[in-house]
Amino acid sequence: MGKHKQQVLSRFFAPKTATSPLTTTAPDSSSAAASSMSSPPLSNPNPPTPPPKISATVSFSPSKRKLLTSHLTPKSKKPKLSPHTQNPVPNPSLHQKFLQKLLEPSEQIPEHSNQPSSSNPKKYTPLEQQVVDLKNKYPDVLLMVEVGYKFRFFGEDAEIAARVLGIYCHVDHNFMTASVPTFRLNVHVRRLVSAGYKVGVVKQTETAAIKAHGANRAGPFVRGLSALYTKATLEAAEDVGGREEGCGGVSNYLLCVVERSLLGEKVESGIDAKLGFVAVEVSTGDVVYGEFSDDFMRSGLEAAIMNLTPAEMLFGNQISKQTEKILLAYAGPASNVRVEHASCDCFNDGGALAEVMCLFENILEDNTADNRRQNMEPEHENNHPTIQGIMNMPDLAVQALALTIRHLKQFGFERILSLGASFRPLMSEKEMNLSANTLQQLEVFGNNSNRSESASLLHIMNHTVTIYGSRLLRHWVSHPLCDRNMISARLDAVSEIAEAMGSLKALQCVEMLDGQYSDIAAVQPDFYYVLSSVLTTLGRSSDIQRGITRIFHRTATASEFIAVIEAILYTGKQLQRLNINSDFKNETVQADTVHSALLKKLILTASSASVVDNATKLLSAINKEAADKGDLPNLLIITNGQFPEVAKAREAVQSVKAKLDSLIGLYRKQLRMSNLEFTSVSGTTHLIELPLDVKVSLNWVKINSTRKTIRYHPPEVLTALDQLTLTNEELGIVSRAAWDGFLMEFGKYYAEFQAAVQALAALDCLHSLATLSKNKNYVRPVFVDDEEPVQIIISSGRHPVLETIVQDNFVPNDTNLHADREYCQIVTGPNMGGKSCYIRQVALIAMMAQLPSSCIHRAISMAARLEEVVTMRKENKLQKGLLVEEAPTDREKRAKEIPESLGCFRGGKITSSEERIGVYRELFSNLKLAERDGDPVKSFQFLENARIIVKELMNRQSNRIW
């Protein structure tokens, strides 16, 4: 029997050293001894030959080996306690200490954070040290650091980005890190800003060519904060695109609120307080300010918030709990409204006005220096309209303005408050000031079901085609006019546009072509044709109001600059075709194609000769093809000595290129090839292509080759290419500086361009109201003179919103209120009978008439002095943590608010019947008292669910019609 061969089942794993169970073992010595004692010794001296040992080596994969080991290895038995020992007595406190030590993280475990620890110093990489320095400089900013072709997040910023953006976060060296590609920067920035974070983009401030020739050639790239974004500044900052991701809403106001107690106590404990605020729309230059005394309910502040809908809030350090509840009710966690606190202690003793005036002095000094360089007359400080407006602002509003300026300095947008802003008060004597409850109950901006804009007054009235027109219409709806002349001017404009709709007439006229008289007969288009074509073109273009403000902030790109200026130039030239107040005198030309004074004023402002000339001048300095390609070095057109730095840098580039091209003659002589030329392959220029058998110097660098040729870069070409790259980088830097200077010069044209855009927005709003009246067959309201008694007469009036929803099923109603006849109506009936709908209908028709707009009825006659709409039922604000019951002083104040108002009172579910009766009696006592004293009645009242006191009132005034 031959020797058995050992078969190896796997050659990837070494055989185990453990003894195989198949191997026979030697007999036990005790058993051998026992057998020897029980049996006599054998006579055969040669013992039998033992069987050969047979062994096998079996190898398994790691997973199977682990599985077999768990099955074959005998489980260790738990040691049993001896009968003499007892189990320990449980100790709860010791158990709690054990759990606390087990579950809580140990202090020795290193945490990945943004801040270095002094007790546990870490060794950072050069990139990480840059991140630490930047984070110490901007602690409240979420940083996106450009590293190669990615933007990376570090530390806590990486964890936030992973949660918001849904990306992977992992540990790298000393920090948690996450990254996104560079081409998706626009999407991720807007998503982070929409979540309420302040996002900073950190980019490399030097290129590879400049770094190679600088002192930092061996170190990392120098990085710095290039852009800072929040919800209120995103549209004005450097364009990142991606507006479909959000934050490009109708308005993005930054609201700053400052508070002072009226009772001389601390702000935290004050009930009645004086509030001052400033709201800045950084992307449009609109600044709204105000100061007012507010009650415990903070109804004035709530109305301001509803009108402005801010995207970001800035609080002073001393805010009462009542004010904070109102603000946080709007800027809650679900709203993504960013909230920031600031200290205003340094503004107590006139420091606010001093800081504001310091900003204006610096800006005016810079403008004066620029004007002197351009041989222009400097503007006087005291004659600046913005300074005069700020000097007339209230004290708390000035403090809020100073806080806003300090806040905007970190973004570089403080110039908008000094030169490009249009300051206006929130409350004006010529406009109605609607309370927050009025706006909510009448569903002006949103319905009461889900607070969305659908089925609201603004939704059914908004037929604007531009974004800036929609913003202006929102202001018109929330601030109806009170001045009779202004209402009549708007009504004339709306009526003229509505009459011109559908009648595209053409008049034969003789126009002046190219500044000379001509006998060519041209067709002058109709007014509505020109207006509709201009608005249609503007509706297809971008938001030019924000565009010119971005140009003022120097954050606009070249292509955006051309698009905005071309849109303004196009509208100006088109509106000039109407020849309004034209100096061209000819009998064949109709002098006035537009009759409304307001329309003439708006068209002349939008088509001003100064605006058209300046727009043409600005466009003549830019190369449109280079702007479309993003070619910044060739963007500016150098004529008449403009941009001398750019011209010098371009000459340097051309000089290096000429020197580089001249090297080909040297190599022709050296290689004795008269037809030798430089070639370019795959973006690599100035290559010398030679056959394989041509010998060259050893210092020539081989770039690439083919089967028959080899391409080289001689050392002189490498030196020249390096110099060309450096000069191109310098040209880019100079071109960027020249472009910034060119945008800076736009500041002197900003005011007239902004006025032109505002005029176009007003034309869009008037066209929207005319479209509404034309589609719904509305009629024009008639306003009586001031000498006539106050009255409101509506024939077949319909609810403007409800009629759109139910369409033909709505039943019209009449309203007839007169100061000398019936001036109060008590509306009674069953539940869901349409009482509230009728009251809201009258209030909405009054608002639409004073907007002004044509209204939903056959005829209307009313006075232009209906200043306030006091609405129905107070909203239940238990969910906001606010007080529900009204104080007695508030009820008395509401009952006494009679003069020149349309009152709509309804007893709500919260107020008891006794309190409703008290309010009604107080109201009627004031009405009767005013009538008894001989004062004319200027108030109309609608009382709902007042059936309890109807009988008492009828008994007292049996000869009066109610």
Image (tube, rainbow, N blue to C red):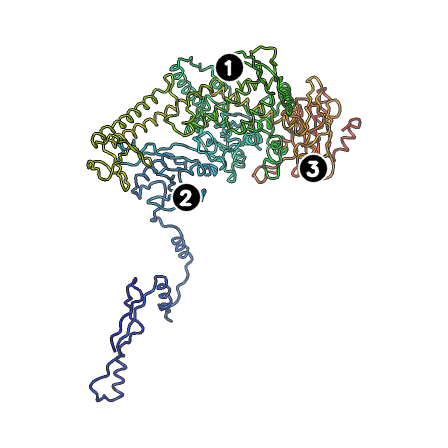
Q: Are marks 3 and 2 in contact (CB under 8 Å)?
A: no
Residue density around tag 1, few if under 14, some if 14–19, many if 20 or more, within 10 Å: few
- Chain-order first, disc 3 or disc 1: 1
Residue bearing mark 1: 514
Residue bearing mark 3: 913
Where residue 422 sits in the image (x, y, percent)? 51, 22
Tell me, yes or no, if residue 783 can be seen here.
Answer: yes
Occupied quadrant, residue 844: top right
Residue under the image location 40 percent in, 57 percent down: 94
Q: Relative to 332, is 671 on the left or the right?
A: left
Where residue 589 sits in the image (x, y, percent)? 60, 13
Which numbered marker is on residue 159? Answer: 2
Measured Cα–Cα span from mark 3 to mark 2? 56 Å
Where residue 237 sits in the image (x, y, percent)? 44, 30
712 or 415: nearer the eye? 712
Which numbered marker is on residue 501? Answer: none
Q: Residue furthest right?
A: 959
Residue density around tag 2, few if under 14, some if 14–19, many if 20 or more, within 10 Å: some
Name which residue type carries label 3. Answer: Ser
Measured Cα–Cα span from mark 2 to mark 1? 65 Å
Occupied quadrant, residue 402: top left
Residue under the image location 40 percent in, 13 percent down: 375
Which numbered mark, 2 or 1, is in the foreground of this view?
1
Residue under the image location 36 percent in, 61 percent down: 63
Rendered position, 888 above or below 612: below
Q: Residue furthest front?
A: 674
Quadrant of the drawing holding the C terminus:
top right
- Chain-order first, disc 2 or disc 1: 2
Name which residue type carries label 1. Answer: Asp
